[in-house]
């Protein structure tokens, strides 16, 4: 149980285009999901907290107009990187808060490369 | 300590060796410490969540201890096997009186077990 999927697993896009990444909880409902990114040789850094049916909460330094988060259902949150630039190239990974709210279950991540 | 620090960065051991690594975290406003096991191309897998000073948890050959007063946790692997090869992440939840679900991760310890 507690499986989280992400799609796509990797994506290459051109500078200036937008990319959408999906995060799904497959066997449980998640009112809260989280988006992280990891730059090479760095730790996972929390970008935003996504709550079903409400606006996401962004961490300091993360542009909410650039990283659009939608959590329209209890099993799906999406992250859209708008007008992507090469510096947005990173590994993006989501997690979903478990039913007992004691543990976050992670997806396998999405490698984004902006050319 | 302001950040979550893990040491060593990487570790090579022989099959059958026992090993351990360290996670240091800020001791103020502490709520919980999480350990994850992350194999390449897979989702990080939750190993332990610990909240109380002196907590010790065990899952098979893997165990962990927690010292909240001095801000460190140890992860031990007894009789390492090649399938233990992975990056081990720790993350602190600095929610003080209750979880705020915001995890601050270390950079991880990459363990390679040679057959």
Image (cartoon, rainbow, N blue to C red):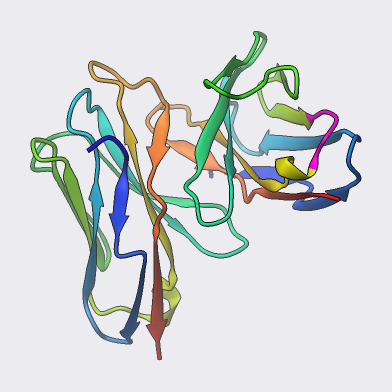
Task: Please report the residue visible at 47 percent of the width from the left and 27 percent of the height from the top.
Answer: A99
Residue B24: x percent and y percent? 23, 46
- Identify the image quadrant of residue B25: top left
Residue B39: x percent and y percent? 52, 64
Q: Quadrant of the N terminus of chain B?
A: top left
**What secondary structure is the stretch in magenta mostly built from?**
loop
Task: Please report the residue visible at 79 percent of the width from the left and 47 percent of the height from the top.
Answer: A8
Magenta span covers which residues? A81-85
Left or right of residue B52: residue B37 = right
In the foreground, A38 or A72:
A38
The answer to whether residue B84 is seen in the rendering is yes
Left or right of residue B69: residue B10 = right
Q: Quadrant of the C terminus of chain B?
A: bottom left
Residue B55: x percent and y percent? 13, 43
Task: Please report the residue visible at 59 percent of the width from the left and 59 percent of the height from the top.
Answer: B42
View extreme (bottom): residue = B115
Residue B89: x percent and y percent? 39, 53
From this view, report whether residue A53 is shown above or below residue A10. above
Q: Is residue A26 magenta?
A: no
Left or right of residue A97: residue A83 = right
Left or right of residue A92: residue B89 = left
The answer to whether residue B77 is seen in the rendering is no
Q: How many marks?
A: 0
Task: Please report the residue visible at 44 percent of the width from the left and 76 percent of the height from the top.
Answer: B83
In the foreground, B58 or A67:
A67
- Identify the image quadrant of residue B76: bottom left
């Amino acid at each position: 149980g507690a499986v989280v999927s992400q799609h796509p697993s990797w994506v290459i896009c051109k500078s200036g285009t937008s990319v959408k990444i999906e995060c799904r909880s497959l066997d449980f409902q998640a009112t809260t999901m989280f988006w992280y990114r990891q730059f090479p040789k760095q730790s996972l850094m929390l970008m935003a907290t996504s709550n079903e049916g409400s606006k996401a909460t962004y961490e300091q330094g993360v542009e909410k107009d650039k990283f659009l988060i939608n959590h329209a259902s209890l099993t799906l949150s999406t992250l859209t990187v708008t007008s992507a630039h090469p510096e947005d190239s990173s590994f993006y990974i989501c997690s979903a808060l478990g039913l007992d709210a004691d543990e976050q279950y992670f997806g396998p991540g999405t490698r984004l490369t902006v050319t | 300590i302001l950040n979550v620090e893990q040491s060593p960065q990487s570790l090579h051991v022989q099959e059958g060796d026992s090993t351990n690594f360290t996670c240091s975290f800020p001791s103020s406003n502490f709520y919980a410490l999480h350990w994850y096991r992350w194999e390449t191309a897979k989702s990080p897998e939750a190993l332990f969540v610990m909240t109380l000073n002196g907590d010790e948890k065990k899952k098979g050959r893997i165990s962990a201890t927690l010292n909240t007063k001095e801000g460190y946790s140890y992860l031990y692997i007894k009789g390492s096997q090649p399938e233990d090869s992975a990056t081990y992440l720790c993350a602190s939840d600095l929610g003080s009186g209750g979880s705020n679900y915001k995890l601050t991760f270390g950079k991880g310890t990459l363990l390679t077990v040679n057959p």
